Image (cartoon, rainbow, N blue to C red):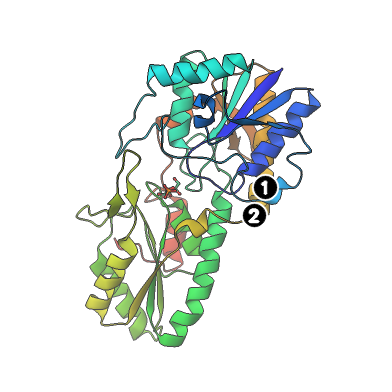
Amino acid sequence: MRIAVLNCGGDCPGLNAVIHGVTCAAAELDWEVIGFRDGFEGMIREGGDYMMLTPEDTQGIIKLGGTILGTTNKGNFAAKQGEGDVAKVPAEIVARAKQTVDMLKIEAVVVIGGDGSLTTAQQLYEEGWPIIGVPKTIDNDLTATAMTFGFDSAVSCVVDGLDRLYTTALSHKRVIVLEVMGRHAGWIALYGGIAGGANAILLPEIPFDVEKVADSIKERDAEGNHSTLVVVAEGAKTEDGLVLKCQNEGAEVRLGGIGDTVAARIEELTGKETRSCTLGHLQRGGDPTALDRILGARFGVMAVKLADRGEFGQMVSYQSYHVGSVPIKEAVSELRLVEADGEVVNAARALGICFGD
Ligand code: F6P
């Protein structure tokens, strides 16, 4: 048997661990593994753009961030074309990719992707492709899996950032606003903020009023806490619905800039010196944490198991400490968002963290 593996969408620490898991588990079954470069795009390049993967080729990559296969979140297979718009991959493109799959006699395609790429994977499955999905996103916003690899690494990066900002904010009695990733879901901001000791956390799921954030900073000042750390998710919304976008070029809307805006308003309202810092792609880069390495490798091994059982159209999923599977369709039907009145947010409130609401 010969199977293919590819990853598409934004990269994510732990992708290489999945590739390693797929390759090793397939080798155990005496299967061959083809890794397509740059996601599905590798399938429509002349003759197919791919590399054969053996366990020797993937030795040591479990610890590396990024992906040895390359990836893209744009191009012919991008399912998300703007705010909430889902695009179908054109029939002519699918046919070209299918030609490569047939030519190479591939019997299963393992697609490692987030919400957008899994939407593409579901379309192909419905068109008869032997697809297995593996969930991937630092945002941790896929329903039907309790956790995606990459999230823990991103949170660790936020915590490291906050630990550094804490000492400088304290020394200067300043407010520092840290903008983090999190398009629709604020999991990175919430977990990173709690673990990194943030005093205010602003999420897409809880519209905020900057005046309430300013009031909480003034209260802290009056109590003798002269520095404050604010974490804001890039997709956070003000109560009047403002979301900051930088660009939208035939792909998902690019977010960014809310940190600067929030910092300027806080300075205006509190009179306190305020700085802002954007963590950006530092959260996606670098080596995966131990948790993400293990999760990624287990996901890769499970993907091969599903292919072996012929369970196509399924996505690997992590629930109650077990790796199992669910239909891809279920996984992409809705996003897993932070519950505004859920246990984690309430725990954060009990710690004195302000959500600006
Ligand atoms: O979806 C994952 C994510 O990291 C989002 O949090 C962020 O908005 C987006 O990717 C950034 O993508 P790009 O690589 O296109 O800047």
Q: What numbered label is drawn on residue 186? A: none
Q: Residue at x 25, y 57 (%)?
A: 238
Q: Is residue 195 visible?
A: no
Relative to 348, residue 270 above or below: below
Gap in Å between the C-alphas at discs 2 and 1? 6 Å
Confirm or reject: label 2 Cβ below 8 Å from ligand 1. Answer: no
Q: Position of residue 345 (x, y in %)?
A: 43, 56
Left or right: 33 as drawn, with respect to 90: right
For label 2, the residue is 289
110, 44: nearer the viewer: 44
Labels 2 and 1 touching (C-beta < 8 A): yes
Relative to 35, residue 256 above or below: below
122, 79: nearer the viewer: 79
Q: Residue at x 34, y 56 (%)?
A: 256
Q: Secondary structure at mark 1?
A: helix
Left or right: 54 as drawn, with respect to 336: right
Outermost residue to the front = 46
For label 1, the residue is 293
220, 265: nearer the viewer: 265
Q: Position of residue 268 (x, y in %)?
A: 22, 77
148, 357: nearer the viewer: 148
